[in-house]
Each structure stands twice: as structure tokens, then as C-alpha cells.
Amino acid sequence: MAEVTKLIHRYLRHSKKFPHVYCPGCGHGIVLGSLIRSIHALNLKKDDVVLVAGIGCSGRMAVYVDFNTVHTTHGRALSFATGIKLANPRLKVIAVMGDGDAMSIGGNHLIHAARRNIGVTALILNNGIYGMTGGQSSCTTPQDSFSSTAPFGHMEHDFDLVKLTEACKANFVARTTVMHAKQMDKMLTTAIDQRGFNLVEVMTPCHTQYGRKNGFKTIVDMYKWYQKSAVQYEKYLNLPEEKRQGCFPIGVFSDNDQPGLEERYEELRRSLAGGDDK
Ligand code: SF4
Ligand code: MG
């Protein structure tokens, strides 16, 4: 245990930035642990990693980790990440965002970063609500559920991030939950290691802003719900329609090896320079 703590602390600004702000039982710490384990497994130097974050509870990760970090404005993490990757393609660039940050406010940046297949890992923590900013509905808040901006029930359809990024032809598209930490480690290791735009969506509970308004007595009930409702993709495909109700698929949905935008850009630059420019 002491060894694990020592390992985790090596990647954190532990003595400067803690204690953290997360509510007891929040899933964000599980995701942060998985991110650190994945970077450690890939044997990356801390200086070769850039963590870009937007605003919200997930955005705090950029404060806590000891990589190159940029804590940007709400919804803009991917535009900063795109610029960093194009300026220095050698870096491993990871954009950490919440659902409100990545898909509501930053939805257009997400669509175009995925479409360009820029070499960035997008780690999206989807808790179906704006957590830190007041519990407002986001574009992943389930229809008919309650939030601070939907006291009579949320009237809109929610968004499927996996289908959206698949349609944009991102290289890697995967989803898991905080109850599937080993799967999350594997997905993040793959996503960070390979080229192109790589998306990992993690379903994670926010009892403070969502659960307690929607019939979950405790945070433990939320974790149990994720465990019960998440079905591995291959199994999900074989379920009859009526058994899919209330469930959602997890797993790897796309895994391609197309060059990232920065690689195509470099190729063009070299060909315009006559092919002998280093
Ligand atoms: Fe986690 Fe929600 Fe608390 Fe934010 S508000 S730290 S997402 S439980
Ligand atoms: Mg959120």
C-alpha cells in the first residue's frame, strides 16, 4: 500500500495543492488514479505529458497532477490541446473534460477535433450534470430527470457521445464506468499510446448535484446502478430490445490507425520543402 501511495504521489502536486475539492464518494478520484496508472505503465516522462483541462470538477485535475498543465476556459480545452499538439507533436496531449465542458459548451470543438483526428486523448468524465457550477442540466442529463434548472423534469433528449465521435471518424472511441477500473486503465493506456484522436468516456457519479435529486439515497446506490446498468458491448449487441432498456453499452466501439492531423501537416510541410527538410 505504501508503495502504491508513493507511486501515485510521484505524479501529484501533493504537498502544494491538496487537500482536493472533490465531494466524499465522487468518482473523479478513481479516474485520476487510472490516468496516473496508465501514464506510469507507458513509462512516459512527466515532461512529455501535457494535461489540458477546462472548467468544472474534472478541470481540477490539471491543478493536482505534476505534468505540464493548462487550466483553460470553459469548453475550450480541446482548442488549446489542438494548438499544443500542432506546435509540438512529440508531446502526449490529454484533454480532461466533464460532459458540460466537452459536449455542451465545447461541443463544436469536440466535433471538429474528432473530425480532424488531431493526436489528442480526450478523457471525458460524464456524470450527466454540471457539477461544480451549480447542478444545471447538461446535454447528457437523462430526459425526465431532475436538476437545478429542471425542477419539473428535464425535457430534452440526452446526447450519445460514442455515436457522435464515431460519426466524426475519430481513431479510437471507448466508454467505461468508474466501476470498471481495470477496463479504464486498459482503454486509457491504448488511447494515450496511439496516434489520432482517441476518446475515452467514463460514466461517473455525482451524488451531490444529480444523485440525491434523482432517487439515489446514497452514493453507494449510484455505484451499484452503474455496475448493474453497464453491459459489455459484445453482450449488449445480443440483447433483445426490451432487455436493453435502462442499460448502456461499454467497451471499445472504434479502433483505427489513421494518421493524426499533425502527421499529415508535417508530411505536407516536408513535401513543400522538397522532401529533404528535417
Ligand atoms: Fe464530484 Fe459532483 Fe462533488 Fe463535483 S459536485 S466533486 S462531480 S460529487
Ligand atoms: Mg458533468
Image (tube, rainbow, N blue to C red):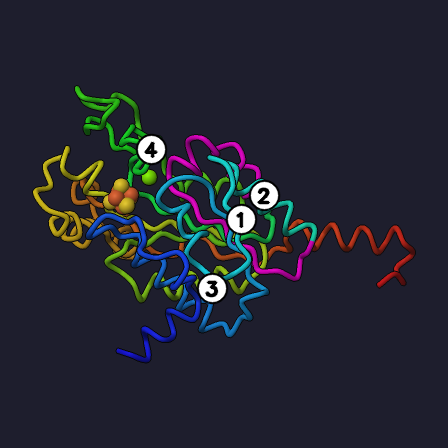
Indicate which disc residue 70 carries: 1
Q: In the image, what residue occupies the spot 20% across and 40% down? A: 208
Indicate which disc residue 190 carries: 3
Q: Earlier in the sequence, mark 3 or mark 4?
A: 4
- Magenta-highlighted residues: 88-116
Q: Is residue 171 visible?
A: no
Kind of element beneath mark 1? strand
Q: Earlier in the sequence, mark 2 or mark 4?
A: 2
Q: Which residue is mark 4?
A: 133
Q: Nearer the viewer, mark 3 or mark 2?
A: 2
Question: What distance separates the C-alpha of mark 3 from that of mark 1?
Answer: 23 Å
Asked whether residue 169 is drawn in magenta, I would say: no
Q: Is residue 17 left or right of residue 92?
A: left
Q: Is residue 134 left or right of residue 50?
A: left
**Is 185 or 148 nearer to us in this picture?**
148
Question: What distance separates the C-alpha of mark 3 from that of mark 2?
Answer: 22 Å
Asked whether residue 114 is drawn in magenta, I would say: yes
Residue 197 location (% of width, % of height): 54, 51
Kind of element beneath mark 3? helix
Furthest residue in direction bottom, as rendered: 3
Kind of element beneath mark 2? helix
Q: Are marks 3 and 1 in contact (CB under 8 Å)?
A: no
Question: What distance separates the C-alpha of mark 4 from that of mark 1?
Answer: 20 Å
Q: Is residue 64 visible?
A: yes
Q: Is residue 176 left or right of residue 95?
A: left
Question: Label 1 is placed on what type of residue?
Answer: Val
Q: Are marks 2 and 4 in contact (CB under 8 Å)?
A: no
Ligand 2 within 8 angstroms of badge 2 C-beta:
no
Query: Label 3 neighbourhood size at 10 Å, few (<14), some (14-19), many (20+)?
Result: some
